[in-house]
Every structure is written in structure tokens, then in C-alpha cells.
């Protein structure tokens, strides 16, 4: 058996979050209410930690299914958020994906790590956990600018 390699420097955790949009008469975003600390009971984008054998997109698809019961369609790689201190559990870098929800993906239903979920109008959001307000603001800016 090969000797395990150890690394002398701390490593960041990697997560993937999904901004799920529903484009009806009034555009909406799907948020989960966190079941566990940190930010217990606050609203957040669906997402979570990458497992060692996954790609970022696989992480986003798995976490979306686990937390909302939605089978992800096309995921658009949006941006990376890496500001130190963005997660009180430690150094965490997240890749955000954007997805347009379609009915054939399944009706959202709260799953693991989610006490509840709800569609919110993009101009009527609750207070968000982590740096998710900044992320949503950036997604809104992209929509408005058409980029």
C-alpha cells in the first residue's frame, strides 16, 4: 500500500451553491431554511460541501436533489466566492451555479439540511445566511445586464 501523502498547509473546504430561478410573471428564487447551525433557521441558497470523488457540477446536482428534491437541468457556472470569513466553520470557497427551474425537474420539497423551502420574489427576500445576499445581488445584476 502506498504511503499517504500529508500536506503541511491548511486546506480550504469547497462547496457548490445553486441559484434556482423560476421565471413566471414575477421572477422568483428558491431558498431553503437551514435546519442546522451555522445560521440555523435562516434562509440560504441550496448547496453544500463537495465530496472527494465529485466535480463541482456533481456536487451542485447532488446537493440540490438532497435539499430540494429537484433533478437539476442545465447548470450555468456563474461565479466563485472565496472571501475569507464567509463561512464561520472555516475557510470555504464556493462555486455558484444558476439554473432555471422547469416543472419537469420536479416540485421542490424540503430534504436533508433544509427545515423548509420557499420561492421568494427577487425584490422581496428574507435575511440570508453566509454571503448569499451578495451572491443573489450579483445574479440579479447579471440578469438585468443580460450578461
Image (cartoon, rainbow, N blue to C red):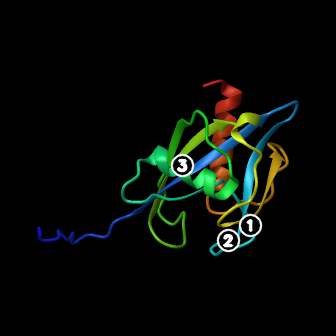
10 left or right of 78?
Answer: left
Q: How many C-alpha atoms fall within 10 Å of the one at disc 3: few (<14), some, or many (≥20)?
A: many
Q: CA distance from mark 2 to mark 1?
A: 5 Å
Q: How many C-alpha atoms fall within 10 Å of the one at disc 2: few (<14), some, or many (≥20)?
A: some
Nearest the eye: 63 or 12:
63
Nearest the eye: 134 or 29:
29
Kindly report which numbered mark, 2 or 3, lies closer to the viewer in this rendering: 3
Q: The N terminus appears in which quarter of the rendering? A: bottom left
Question: Residue 42: which disc?
Answer: 1
Residue at 41%, 52% (x, y): give it: 54
Kindly report which numbered mark, 1 or 3, lies closer to the viewer in this rendering: 3
Question: Residue 39: which disc?
Answer: 2
Q: Secondary structure at mark 3?
A: helix
Residue at 57%, 55% (x, y): give it: 63
Q: Secondary structure at mark 1?
A: loop
Q: Quadrant of residue 4?
A: bottom left
Q: Secondary structure at mark 2?
A: loop
Q: The C terminus appears in which quarter of the rendering? A: top right
Residue at 67%, 46% (x, y): give it: 70
Residue where numbered disc 3 is placed: 60
Amino acid at each position: 500500500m502506498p504511503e499517504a501523502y500529508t500536506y503541511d498547509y491548511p486546506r480550504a473546504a469547497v462547496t457548490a451553491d445553486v441559484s434556482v430561478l423560476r421565471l413566471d410573471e414575477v421572477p422568483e428564487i428558491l431558498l431553503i431554511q437551514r435546519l442546522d447551525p451555522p445560521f440555523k433557521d435562516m434562509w440560504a441558497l441550496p448547496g453544500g460541501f463537495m465530496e472527494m470523488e465529485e466535480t463541482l457540477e456533481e456536487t451542485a446536482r447532488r446537493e440540490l436533489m438532497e435539499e430540494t428534491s429537484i433533478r437539476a437541468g442545465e447548470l450555468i457556472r456563474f461565479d466563485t466566492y472565496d472571501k475569507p470569513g464567509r463561512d464561520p466553520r472555516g475557510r470555504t470557497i464556493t462555486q455558484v451555479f444558476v439554473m432555471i427551474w422547469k416543472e419537469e425537474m420536479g416540485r421542490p420539497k424540503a430534504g436533508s439540511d433544509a427545515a423548509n423551502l420557499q420561492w421568494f420574489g427577487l425584490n422581496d427576500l428574507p435575511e440570508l445566511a453566509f454571503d448569499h445576499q451578495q451572491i443573489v445581488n450579483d445574479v440579479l445584476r447579471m440578469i438585468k445586464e443580460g450578461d
